[in-house]
Image: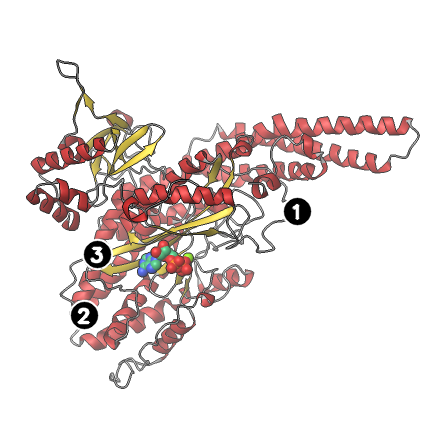
Amino acid sequence: MSDKINLETLYGENVFTISKMKERLPKSVFRNVVNVMQNGGDLSPEDADVVAKAMKDWAIENGATHYTHWFQPLTGITAEKHDSFITSPDEEGRAVTSFSGRDLIKGETDGSSFPSGGLRSTFEARGYTAWDVTSPAFLKESGTGVTLCVPTSFLSYTGEALDKKTPLMRSMEAVNKQALRILRLFGDTAASRVISSTGAEQEYFLVDKDKYLQRTDLIFTGRTLFGAPAPKGQEMDDHYFGVIRERVGEFMKDLNVDLWKLGVPAKTQHNEVAPGQHELAPIYENSNLATDHNQLIMESMKRIADHHRMRVLLHEKPFAGVNGSGKHNNWSLTTDTGENLLDPGTSPEENVRFLLVLSCIIKAVDEHADLLRQSASDVGNDLRLGANEAPPAIVSIFLGKQLTDVVKQLIETGKANSHIEGGVLKTGVSTMPDFIKDATDRNRTSPFAFTGNKFEFRMVGSSDSMADSTTTINAIVAEAFSDAADELGRADDFELAVHDLIKENLSAHQRIIFEGNGYSAEWVEEAAKRGLPNIPSMIEAAPALTTEKSVKLFEKFGIFTRTELESREEITYETYAKKINIEALTMIDMAGKQVIPACMKYERDLANTIIAVKSAGATFSAETEKLQKIADDIDEAQNALDRLRELEKAADGIRDEKELAFYYKDTILPAMTALRKPCDLLETMVDKKSWPFPTYEDLLFEL
Ligand code: ADP
Ligand code: MG
């Protein structure tokens, strides 16, 4: 057994927390920093120097040698460039370290190799990173030693966002402002901020590192491009919440310690539905911090898995035939006075405010279902969403039995005319019951489900950043709040107007509410009848970014400019084409160099066996039949391989990014499927010992 863990002393050990700042900064500087953290604005250069010095001293005391601006470019993963603290040694040859306010606040980055979708032409390739004061600096321990990481945004010199953090923070500001307008209308003058909160449940697979390294597809694409199903999959439901294996448990323990030190509130861990699949959920935090922390979770997972000779697979669909991995975005809005706007509350006033908020969210999701779908799109997620797996590509809202009933009553009652009396609101509807937060009443097939005092958006892919989906949710809800505040601000009788507006929102947007099985074929039909969008792929979802509706929304709140949206759409096509191209090339490589040669060798052995059996005078019909089948499948595989090669070559001639992306989806992907089919069949017939790489069975069950 390794050392005992003391959670209390461990927690936040590697974070330059507010309490550490309080200890180390002069009072006035500390106050200024906290003020900027809470209310925005800039730190003065003098204060920045003081903070930087304190941060550096703390970092060096804790073994740090380098610092980095840690940022989140549009690749979806984090980026960092390390600088050591060292400056020119003094005359006596002693090391001198420095880290100034300027180093802390602003960094320059040659960003030409990060995707920008044309926002930053290469002659003006530099972007800059700017300290996000609201996310604390932390120390990362890794193979390179200890590094001070300063969370930053990444922008072009003309101010366009080149990252995921900047728009997220802008969206948090937007929803804060609009939600406050609503609160003021309800007479709340105490709250001064409304904070969007996120709890990110993270699913992942673990596989043995040595086996992983024998699979080119896992190395290059993060998923298996070949593989016949193992005799057992997830049909026994014996993995979900099952006993955690020792090796996995040791990994989880180290991971937790690593995360706790980083101030990431890792809370729950369990086995997931598929064999080899697990989940980690931290306690929810403000969305910006939660998004940073989710990045740290993914980074730490990779690093710690390696210490246990394992690899973590964050791909949305690493294995065909068993569940893929997602990331649930649990989202709510909380005031700085501690109220959750998504909590139905206990008094009639709270009930009405909740119903207004709810009706605004319903309106927002219905009006921007396409954007919400887009915000969760990712190349890997295409294999999950709409592929009969959690959740479908159609956006709908699940409210649960009790709330659906309330909504129904609200829609059915006429204009507000009754009074609050004996538990009946003006709308004629009963005041809300206490909600039973019963896990069995949960609809696991809904992409956007109300779970007691939050919404759970379940479409997000496991490898994706939390930023995109949260940015979109905040933006669309801010818009609905803004519309509501405009209308209510004009009303003579506020109470009547609120009730009318709730009813209006619910009536106009009730089509988005769906309580049934989201995986069923009937829902696909029903949703089409209701006019709900069903967008199967990432590249078909991308145009949602640049519709007039979307540009109007994002520009109104200063979250994205039209140019930023256009660049993001373009990057989507580029990313898609590149990733599928890598997958196709990997398949060509594996089929050509590994699968087909191994099958041919087995084919020759079998042919020799037949000759031997024949000369020995025994019958050999089973052998011949098998040989023929194998020969046929090898033919089919070889033809499919040749065809895929040809089609890949033809891609070189396509210049337009969007056209190329669709070529990969409509032409290359089917050719990949055609190649996989005979190869997977061959796997079931060929001697296991001569199969060139670990199988599903080896990967999923033998950890
Ligand atoms: P569930 O069983 O619905 O998945 P959990 O209580 O396990 O619910 O929570 C899942 C995630 O949701 C956790 O990360 C948790 O911290 C987060 N969460 C809980 N309450 C809220 C809230 N009000 N707002 C945002 N996230 C929340
Ligand atoms: Mg959940």
Count of numbered badges drawn on the protein: 3
Mark 3 secondary-structure assignment? helix
Residue 219 percent location from the top left of the image: 50, 32
The amino acid type of the residue labelled 1 equals Pro
Tell me, yes or no, if residue 8 can be seen here: yes
* Element on which disc 1 rests: loop
Residue 71: mark: none
Q: In which quarter of the image is residue 601?
A: top right
Horizontal side of residue 223 vs 19, given as left or right: right
The disc label shown at residue 176, or none? 3
- Toward the viewer: 188 or 251? 251
Neighbour tally class for label 1: few under 14, some 14-19, many 20 plus, Cα within 10 Å: few
| N-terminal-most mark, 1 or 3 | 3
Report whether residue 486 is seen: no
Q: Residues within 10 Å of mark 2 (few under 14, many from 20)?
A: some
Distance, label 1 to label 3, CA atoms, is 52 Å
Q: Eyeballing the image, is 489 above or below 373?
A: below
Residue 79: x and y in percent read 32, 33
